[in-house]
Image (tube, rainbow, N blue to C red):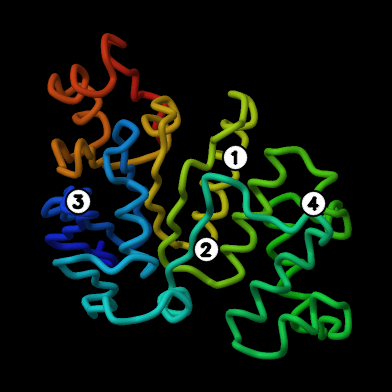
């Protein structure tokens, strides 16, 4: 594999308090990588630096070896970085298909989003085809015209994934996708993500508190604590690391990683 994404020496402080201190992380093409740590460890700050929401005080953000640190959020998205959110960010009065259509318009940089929101710019045949392809891929085809407020939380998470997929990401930043889901919904989401990734070939950087999901889903993992990377390596190695177990996981014992695929 080749390195798709790399952050090197990322530093960020707020009012003199270091949120990130020399954080370096890389993701190879098609890889699934975890980023874990306790609340306040700096995970969201790191994501925001990667996306361009925040500008780091030092360090580089590289995509395919190119420094994208000077690009705004929308241009990073068009270069191939997609994102889902910890708190679902959906419009309650819009349908599932309309959410994907807006993402497609943003990707193309065409049309007026305000016009679409007020219903005066219907999708053309190609836009509808692309939306329907992603909806079927995620098992949401039968819900395409349903308002998102009628969906379950798990289905809403899939709409967010679908919206991100419409931007044709090479790297998907998944921010706490299991938040609010029960174990069955979490397992179903993970299964769908594996299947979609297998078909589309993008890489995933997963921020997650659900240890079981991280252990079963990712191949490598980084651990942040107080803005520092305290461990990195294969997920099985990281999960069994004494420093990680005592500093973050507590006395949970060894995590069975045999289910990882």
Q: Is residue 122 left or right of residue 73?
A: right
Judged by depth in the image, the label closer to the viewer, 3 or 2, is 3
Q: What residue lies at 19% left-to-right and 29% top-to-bottom?
A: 237
Q: Position of residue 141 (x, y in %)?
A: 81, 56
Whether label 4 touches label 3, CB < 8 Å: no
Q: Nearer the viewer, residue 29 or 230?
A: 230
Residue 20: image tag: 3
- Does residue 156 sit above or below 184 in this rendering? below
Judged by depth in the image, the label closer to the viewer, 1 or 4, is 4
Compute the Cα span from label 2 to label 4. 25 Å
Judged by depth in the image, the label closer to the viewer, 1 or 2, is 1
* Label 4 CA crowd tier, 10 Å (few <14, some 14–19, many 20+): many
Residue 200: image tag: 2
Judged by depth in the image, the label closer to the viewer, 1 or 3, is 3
Whether label 1 touches label 3, CB < 8 Å: no
Q: Position of residue 80 (x, y in %)?
A: 43, 73
- Does residue 78 sit above or below 238 in this rendering? below
Q: What residue lies at 34% left-to-right and 81% top-to-bottom?
A: 71
| Lower sequence index among marks 1 and 2 | 1
Residue at disc 2, secondary structure: helix
Compute the Cα span from label 1 to label 2. 16 Å
In the rendered image, the residue lying farthest to the front is: 15
Compute the Cα span from label 1 to label 4. 17 Å
Q: Nearer the viewer, residue 201 or 173?
A: 173
Residue designated by label 1: 189
| Lower sequence index among marks 1 and 3 | 3
Compute the Cα span from label 1 to label 3. 30 Å
Judged by depth in the image, the label closer to the viewer, 4 or 3, is 3
């Amino acid at each position: 594999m080749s390195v798709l994404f790399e952050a090197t020496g990322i530093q960020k402080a707020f009012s003199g308090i270091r949120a990130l201190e020399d954080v370096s992380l890389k993701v190879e093409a098609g890889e699934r990588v975890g980023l874990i740590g306790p609340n306040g460890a700096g995970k969201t700050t790191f994501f925001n630096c990667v996306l361009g929401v925040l500008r780091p005080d030092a360090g580089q953000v590289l995509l395919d070896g190119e420094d994208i640190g000077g690009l705004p959020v929308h241009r990073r998205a068009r270069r191939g970085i997609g994102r889902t959110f910890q708190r679902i960010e959906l419009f309650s009065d819009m349908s599932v298909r309309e959410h994907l259509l807006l993402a497609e318009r943003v990707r193309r940089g065409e049309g007026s989003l305000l016009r679409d929101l007020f219903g005066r710019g219907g999708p053309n045949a190609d836009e509808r085809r692309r939306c329907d392809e992603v909806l079927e891929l995620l098992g949401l085809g039968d819900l395409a015209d349903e308002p998102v407020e009628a969906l379950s939380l798990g289905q809403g998470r899939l709409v967010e994934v679908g919206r991100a997929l419409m931007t044709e990401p090479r790297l998907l930043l998944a921010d706490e996708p299991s938040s609010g889901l029960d174990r069955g919904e979490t397992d179903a989401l993970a299964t769908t993500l594996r299947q979609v990734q297998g078909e589309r070939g993008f890489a995933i950087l997963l921020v997650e508190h659900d240890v079981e999901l991280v252990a079963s889903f990712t191949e490598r993992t980084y651990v942040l604590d107080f803005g520092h990377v305290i461990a990195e390596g294969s997920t099985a190695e990281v999960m069994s690391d004494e420093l990680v177990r005592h500093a973050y996981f507590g006395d949970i014992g060894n995590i069975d990683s045999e289910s990882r695929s």
